[in-house]
């Protein structure tokens, strides 16, 4: 890390004690910024970095709700409004028992740069709760969402803060949240949430966007090396929203996706993952992935297995943070993997990133490679604002163009700063500069 940034980083660590994920995300970005400070010394004077690392607002609240037996439960709700220099705060809500302030802060921090990379007028934020929707009935999930929104609504608005989904928050949850917002505010404000159902203001392609966008990004990475996805063996961790649509698009573009996973285990299907069966198990029945092998009998399931030990050309981590360690990175490299692109946020540990960068394979960080989700959310906001609804093909084309633009910007920035091919550095600098430019223009905010 640049000398000037060491004391800045030390102060950030002291101010955010125990927030390991947040500190990890900050360190990863700050490590890239040395060359930027040399070129633009005003950034130091104006304390842009210190300001970006302090969220504009952090909201923590109680979420009481009753289960189907009438028992009362208390969860904790969060919304971290990280940065609004580029537009209203924008970023998903995560419902998962591991959620805490550190995780939401790291996600909001990353989101700020990701949103800047899209080139769209959206700031960064993130939220969620330690509520676990797994095994809960639809009515329980609805009651939880209603209670959550009863507190959160006062901090939202289409010009203020626009949440979407993330882990544990899909169409069902967004519907309940939107219904409660509408009821409390007495206003049909479609632009207040994205990822909505099509019957009440949702947009085509939003469901597929993060996974499809990730694969469009991979297509560009391969093209930059005069390669294509055709015939490449791929593995995708996770079996949720991002993973399923990454698998679908990778297969459509000629890739052979042989494995995916969930929080219980790994499935290996030599004939290629059958997306229809996967959707039935994970989206419709909401069952553990093991169930896939009941339909596809030749497929193998390994409880608690490590997907990164499977030989592949392309690896797409699409589950959660820090799921791919230094050891996993070494296994992938030993097995000849040439592309790693992150569908999840911060899935690779710092040791893993170091190995990929040192090996000079094509490695793309989540803030660039998974930006298709939020970009399509911004397209949903555009459609809501103009009371319009675009076709699937039109929106999908826009998504592909956005991903190509992000890809090219990362590479151009990496070239400009003397590290050709380094997507991680390119994404960090390009994202940071987008936010910093706007903060400089807006005065001391
Ligand atoms: P989902 O809840 O739809 O799916 C998450 C998947 O990851 C599930 O299959 C889950 O397993 C699995 N999983 C969770 N923890 C682990 C673990 N420790 N080991 C193995 N598998 C695990 O979430 P999303 O697909 O929406 O999100 C996945 C990632 O992508 C997150 O990092 C999110 O922040 C990021 N992201 C999501 C975007 C979106 O548009 N949804 C946009 C940009 C980034 P199980 O089924 O057993 O719960």
Image (spheres, rainbow, N blue to C red):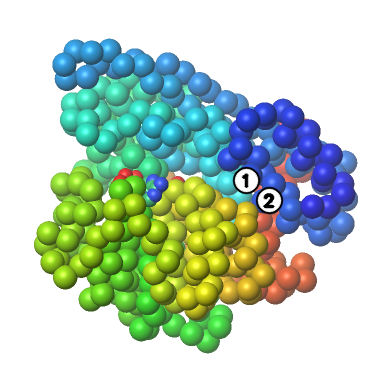
Tell me, for residue 25, which label it has, or none.
Answer: 1
User: Residue 225, how many percent across, how many down?
Assistant: 55, 83
- Describe the element under mark 1 as helix, strand or loop: helix
Q: Is residue 381 left or right of residue 222?
A: left
Residue 314 seen in the current view: yes
User: Residue 50, how many percent across, how many down?
Assistant: 76, 37
Q: Which residue is drawn at the image coordinates 17% and 54% (left, top)?
A: 291
What is the crowding at mark 2: few (fewer than 14 residues within 10 Å), some, or many (at least 20)?
A: many
Q: Which residue has dot 2 on it? A: 29
Nearest the eye: 239 or 445: 239
Nearest the eye: 427 or 1: 1
Q: Quadrant of the C terminus?
A: top right
Q: Is residue 284 left or right of residue 86?
A: left
Residue 267 vs 404, above or below: the answer is above
Which residue is outermost to the bottom? Answer: 226
Q: Is residue 362 left or right of residue 297?
A: right
State which quadrant residue 428 falls in.
Answer: bottom right
Tell me, for residue 355, which label it has, or none.
Answer: none
Distance in Å between CA atoms under marks 1 and 2: 7 Å
User: Residue 404, how many percent across, how many down?
Assistant: 51, 70
């Amino acid at each position: 890390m640049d000398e000037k940034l060491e004391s800045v980083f030390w102060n950030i660590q002291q101010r955010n004690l125990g927030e390991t994920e947040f500190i990890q995300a900050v360190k990863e970005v700050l490590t890239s910024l040395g060359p930027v400070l040399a070129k633009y010394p005003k950034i130091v004077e104006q304390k842009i970095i210190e300001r970006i690392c302090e969220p504009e607002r952090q909201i923590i609240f109680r979420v009481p709700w009753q289960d189907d037996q009438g028992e009362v439960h208390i969860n904790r709700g969060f919304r971290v409004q990280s940065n609004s220099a580029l537009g209203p705060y924008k970023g998903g809500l995560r419902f998962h028992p591991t959620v805490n302030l550190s995780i939401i802060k790291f996600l909001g921090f990353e989101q700020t740069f990701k949103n800047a990379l899209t080139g769209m007028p959206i700031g960064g934020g993130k939220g969620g709760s330690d509520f676990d929707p797994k095994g809960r009935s639809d009515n329980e999930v609805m009651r939880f969402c209603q209670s959550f929104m009863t507190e959160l609504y006062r901090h939202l608005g289409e010009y203020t803060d626009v949440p979407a989904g993330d882990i544990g928050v899909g169409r069902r949850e967004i519907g309940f949240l939107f219904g409660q917002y509408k009821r409390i505010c007495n206003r049909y404000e479609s632009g207040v949430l994205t990822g909505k159902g099509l019957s009440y203001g949702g947009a085509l392609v939003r469901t597929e966007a993060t996974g499809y966008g990730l694969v469009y990004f991979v297509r560009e990475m391969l093209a930059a090396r005069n390669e294509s996805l055709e015939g490449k063996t791929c593995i995708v961790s996770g079996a949720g929203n991002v993973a399923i649509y990454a698998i679908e698009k990778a297969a459509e573009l000629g890739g052979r996706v042989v494995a995916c996973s969930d929080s219980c285990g790994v499935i290996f299907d030599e004939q290629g993952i059958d997306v229809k069966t996967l959707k039935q198990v994970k989206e419709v029945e909401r069952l553990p992935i093991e169930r896939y092998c009941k339909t596809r009998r030749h497929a193998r399931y390994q409880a608690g297995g490590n997907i990164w030990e499977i030989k592949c050309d392309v690896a797409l981590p699409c589950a959660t943070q820090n799921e791919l360690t230094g050891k996993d990175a070494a296994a992938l490299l030993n097995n000849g993997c040439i592309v790693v692109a992150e569908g999840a946020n911060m899935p690779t540990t710092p040791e893993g990133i170091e190995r990929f960068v040192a090996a000079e394979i094509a490695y793309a960080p989540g803030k660039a490679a998974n930006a298709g989700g939020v970009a399509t959310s911004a397209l949903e906001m555009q459609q809501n604002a103009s009371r319009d609804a675009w076709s699937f093909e039109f929106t999908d084309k826009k998504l592909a163009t956005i991903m190509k633009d992000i890809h090219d910007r990362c590479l151009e920035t990496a070239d400009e700063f003397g590290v050709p091919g380094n997507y991680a550095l390119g994404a960090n600098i390009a994202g940071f500069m987008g936010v910093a430019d706007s903060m400089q223009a807006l005065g001391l905010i």
